[in-house]
Image (cartoon, grey):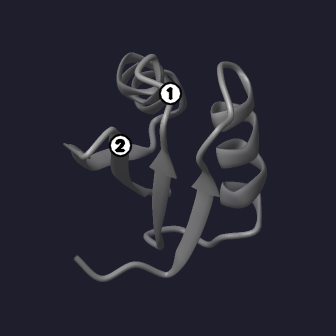
Amino acid sequence: MNFDKELDVRGLVCPLPILRTKKSLADMTHGQILKIVATDPGAVIDFQVFAEQTGNQLLSSDETAGEFLFYLQKK
């Protein structure tokens, strides 16, 4: 999937991945896609809730070898 910006939050636990995501999205424009790589298993639920609460769209959520990959489109 194509993306406009990548955020590496591996090794960070809640709430840091969400806080860093929020900061990264602030620098982006409507429709751009942010790729996020995390290792916190709680991030799966956190990003679903974050997307619902903020109106940003969670395009994809996947896990590979203990890493979680998210694609979030800015509203």
At 45% from the left and 36% from the top, the residue drawn is 55
Residue kind at label 1, given as amino acid type? Asp
Q: Position of residue 9 (x, y in %)?
A: 63, 48
Estimate how packed mark 1 is, as few (under 14), some (14 to 19) or many (20 or more) residues with alpha carbons within 10 Å.
Answer: some
Q: Position of residue 52 (x, y in %)?
A: 40, 24
Residue picked out by circle 1:
40
Q: Position of residue 2 (x, y in %)?
A: 30, 83
Residue picked out by circle 2:
68
- Left or right relative to 2: residue 32: right
Residue 27 appearing in the image: yes
Which residue in the rendered view is the most extreme toward the front?
65
From the viewer's side, name the closer residue of 52 and 66.
Answer: 66
Question: What element does badge 1 sit on?
Answer: loop
At 33% from the left and 38% from the top, the residue drawn is 66
Q: Residue 53 shows which numbered tag?
A: none
The mark that comes first in sequence, 2 or 1, is: 1
Quarter of the image for the N terminus: give it.
bottom left
Q: Answer whether labels 2 and 1 touch (C-beta < 8 Å).
A: yes
Identify whether 26 is placed above or below 54. below
Q: Position of residue 14 (x, y in %)?
A: 66, 19
Residue 75 appearing in the image: no
Residue kind at label 2, given as amino acid type? Phe
At 50% from the left and 21% from the top, the residue drawn is 53
